[in-house]
Image (spheres, rainbow, N blue to C red):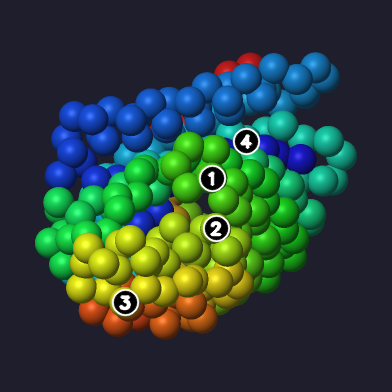
């Protein structure tokens, strides 16, 4: 079993608008995720040591959920490898491994704040603070196919549940290159949907939006393409393209109506692996 901590910005990483406060907060969040990963490494009886991957890059994505405008934001990556119990292993092994079987691990994701002052079309809506989501992910990989499901809770920020279900076809065009492509479906609770897509009566009175009560359920669906190229045992580069359409209340929201139900994201991350005890 390999525990993997993901520290990525989802719709997120707004250092352009808030270079000090928000950028520092996200840096702290990623640091906390890495510290948790290191702490998890202190389990008795590990035979293979501990390996941690840390990456930093950039991405282009919508300004907020339902936006039609895009901007560049930072993108981080973190993963903890080589903590196994028998054949029960995580299916996202990192830049130099190829694992199959069942998987279970932790998941951490950071979402940037939605601020009306940075998006004039949202004038009158309440700001949504940046969020730190933590949870768990489970999956199964055959080596050429894999499926997974995760569930996270916003311990900082939206204080609600959000999850994702997905699958991939795994291609290896070269010894050091892996390409995965598959569907993704995002599911959120009522509270999560209301946070990002709802409009209260008070907000409606202060803005150009009609009041809207958002319900949870399937909020988006689409495809994700990932590419990992390993330069050597320690260095790799990761690319990602995510194309989705908002669904349900997310698509019906007046916030989306003035923006776009099509949401795309592309990012590149340079990753360095550090090994301890190997």
Q: Which mark is drawn over residue 83?
A: none
Residue 122 located left or right of residue 158 = left
Q: Which mark is drawn over residue 191?
A: 2
Residue 259 located left or right of residue 175 = left
Q: Is residue 7 above or below residue 168?
A: above
The residue carrying mark 3 is 210
Q: Residues within 10 Å of mark 4 (few under 14, many from 20)?
A: many
Quarter of the image with the C terminus is top right
Residue 114 image offset from top left, x and y in percent? 29, 53
Contact (Cβ within 8 Å) of mark 1 with mark 2: yes
Residue 87 visible at all: yes
Which one is closest to the eye, mark 3 or mark 2?
Answer: 3
**Mark 4 or mark 2: whose residue is earlier in sequence:** 4
Which one is closest to the eye, mark 4 or mark 1?
Answer: 1
Q: Which mark is drawn over residue 81?
A: 4
The residue carrying mark 1 is 159
Q: CA distance from mark 4 to mark 3?
A: 48 Å
Residue lying at 80% horizontally and 17% vertically, measured from the top left: 44
Judging depth in this view, the residue of 188 and 60 nearest the camera is 188
Residue 269 visible at all: no
SS type, badge 2:
helix
Judging depth in this view, the residue of 96 and 159 nearest the camera is 159
């Amino acid at each position: 079993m390999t525990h993997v901590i993901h520290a990525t910005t989802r719709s997120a990483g707004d250092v352009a608008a808030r270079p000090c406060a928000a950028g520092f907060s996200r840096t702290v969040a990623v640091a906390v995720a890495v510290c948790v990963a290191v702490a998890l490494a202190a389990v008795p009886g590990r035979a293979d040591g501990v390996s941690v991957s840390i990456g930093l890059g950039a991405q282009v994505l919508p300004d907020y959920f339902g936006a039609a405008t895009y901007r560049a934001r930072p993108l981080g990556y973190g993963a903890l490898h080589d903590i196994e119990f028998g054949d029960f292993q995580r299916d996202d092994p990192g830049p130099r491994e190829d694992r199959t079987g069942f998987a279970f691990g932790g998941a951490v994701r950071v979402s940037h704040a939605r601020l009306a002052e940075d998006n004039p079309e949202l004038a009158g809506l309440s700001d949504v603070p940046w969020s730190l989501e933590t949870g768990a992910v489970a999956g199964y990989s055959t080596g050429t196919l894999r499926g997974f499901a995760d569930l996270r809770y916003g311990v900082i920020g939206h204080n609600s549940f959000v999850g994702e279900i997905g699958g991939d076809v795994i291609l290896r065009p070269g010894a050091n290159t892996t390409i995965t492509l598959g569907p993704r479906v995002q599911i959120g609770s009522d509270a999560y949907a209301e946070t990002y897509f709802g409009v209260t009566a008070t907000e409606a009175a202060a803005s150009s939006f009609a009041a809207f009560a958002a319900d949870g359920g399937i909020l988006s669906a689409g495809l994700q393409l990932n590419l990992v190229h390993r330069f050597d045992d320690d260095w790799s580069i990761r690319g990602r393209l995510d194309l989705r359409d908002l669904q349900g209340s997310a698509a019906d929201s007046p916030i989306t109506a003035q923006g776009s139900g099509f949401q795309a994201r592309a990012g590149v991350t340079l990753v360095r692996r550090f090994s301890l005890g190997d």
